[in-house]
Amino acid sequence: MNVQLFGTKKCAETRKAERYFKERGIKLHMVDLAQKGMAAGELRNVAARVGGIEALIDRGGKRYLEKGLAYAAPTGPRIEQMLVEDPLLLRTPIVRSDGRATVGFAPEIWKTWVG
């Protein structure tokens, strides 16, 4: 089982997710969103598995509020473009494995993946 984890080193939830997989001896590929964002295709792929692009936005995050998006939230294709250009607006951690994906810390779901 290969797991891809998107998050930031400063995010406590991302660190907890990383620890979860490492403790179970599962190979993990970490992508730090502060250094490299998701490609548009990756973003669409994950969004399709987690209930849409809206589920990926961290509406309570500092970055979202700093940009004033709470008052002028973009819609449709603009959301996707915004998330590609500024990956720190994504809710983390984003975990992908074998065509499945989750957003946020979700050990109960990951447990079903591990078996």
Image: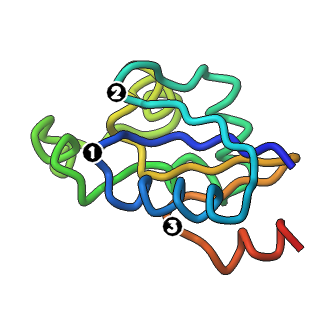
The residue singled out by tag 2 in the image is 34
Badge 1 amino acid: Lys
Is the image coloured rainbow, by chain, by secondary structure, or in one colour? rainbow
For label 2, the SS is: loop
For label 3, the SS is: loop
Label located before the other in sequence (1 or 3): 1
Question: To which quarter of the image does residue 79 belong?
Answer: top left
Question: To which quarter of the image does residue 5 belong?
Answer: top right
Q: Nearer the viewer, residue 76 or 103?
A: 103
Q: Marks 1/3: CA distance?
A: 15 Å
Q: Nearer the viewer, residue 37 or 43?
A: 37
Q: Nearer the viewer, mark 1 or mark 3?
A: 1
* Mark 1 residue crowding within 10 angstroms, few (<14) / some (14–19) / many (20+): few
For label 1, the SS is: loop
- Which image quarter is the C terminus in? bottom right
Left or right, residue 67 beside residue 3: left
Are circles 1 and 2 on residues that touch, CB within 8 Å?
yes
Q: Marks 1/2: CA distance?
A: 9 Å
Give the number of the disc on residue 105. 3
The residue singled out by tag 1 in the image is 10
Place of residue 16 in the rendered image (x, y in percent of width and height, measured from the top left): 45, 63
Q: Does 109 appear above or below 71?
A: below
Badge 2 amino acid: Ala
Residue at screen point 81% across, 43% down: 2
Place of residue 74 in the rendered image (x, y in percent of width and height, measured from the top left): 35, 38
Left or right, residue 5 beside residue 110: left
Label located before the other in sequence (1 or 2): 1
Q: Does 62 appear above or below 105?
A: above
* Mark 3 residue crowding within 10 angstroms, few (<14) / some (14–19) / many (20+): many
